Amino acid sequence: MDRISGAGHVNRMWVAEDKATSRPPTEFTAEWFNGVQESLVRTIEAADLVPSDVDFDQFTDALAVLIGRAITTALAPLPRVYSITALPNTNVGPIIVKEVMEVWGWSTSAYFTGYRSPLCGRPLDGHTTSPLPSEVDATGGVLSKTAYAGLWGYALENNLSVLQANWTANIGAHYFVDVDANSFRVPDLRNMFRRYTGTDADTANARALGSRQLDAIQNITGTWSNVILRDTTNASGAFAAGPGNGSGATGTSGSGNGFTFDASRVVRTSSETRGRNVAYVPRLHV
């Protein structure tokens, strides 16, 4: 609707009759009254109410209905909040899992149907002494297929389930085991460094997801010539006399082709090859 435009209006506002100046009242026009009527009636009808001659509250009722609809529509895209222990059994759209403050979606595959995190199965660096609600220890334990159906489904979907013998022979791999009808075993990722997939330099084979690789030191080759051997009773060097053709007496130097080497005299050594590191607890996201 629009403001009045009938004869006698002042700045499109109503004026009353003024007999002293012979000013007539503003003209009533059909256009304006129709505008008022249709604006009110169409608001009532938009709220699915039937216009009435006796119900004078219909317009305010209609406003309440329409405002309620607007609020519902505005909030509809927002995920509803659920506990990780009480997830919906049917697809109600994206949800927020309050214990982890994540948005989870409905997942459907040949191995799992239900709500789970898009991060399900991801290895995590546990930074707490006990697992968070979204985590389980990745230390080779056995879990319930019912309680952790999403994680077991992840393992099957990504071909990460192996026989127990294969799991045992590859401890440290990102492998799972189908223990029985009710339970499954998770990986034991303790003492493992992460390495991304690519082509193995030794075998020229592509690394498979979750596979384990043993430690190694890059091979060093070369030729030792004109070796001077030194008796360790008087020496502090890294080399010690061994079988050969040296002619030096005890406590003296000589030459020969046999020697031993002890790296502990010059670098840090241990029973494993490793870089500097910090320890976290291996966990999996459920």
Image (cartoon, rainbow, N blue to C red):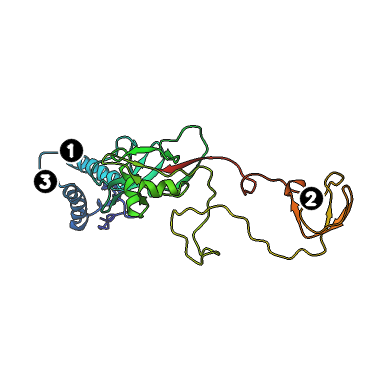
> Which one is closest to the eye, mark 2 or mark 3?
2
Q: Residue furthest top?
A: 129
Q: Position of residue 121 (x, y in %)?
A: 40, 47
Q: Find the distance from the CA under tag 1 to the CA under tag 2.
A: 101 Å
Secondary structure at badge 2 equals loop
Secondary structure at badge 3 equals loop
Kindly check if marks 3 and 1 are in contact, taking CB atoms under 8 A apart as contact: no
x 88%, y 47%: residue: 251
Kindly check if marks 2 and 3 are in contact, taking CB atoms under 8 A apart as contact: no
Comparing 115 with 183, the one in front is 183
Note whether 152 is above or below 203 in the view shown.
above
Residue designated by label 1 = 57
Comparing 231 with 144, the one in front is 231
Q: Find the distance from the CA under tag 2 to the CA under tag 3.
A: 102 Å
Where on the picture, by quarter, is residue 81?
top left
Residue designated by label 2 = 238
Residue type at tag 1: Asp
Residue designated by label 3 = 50
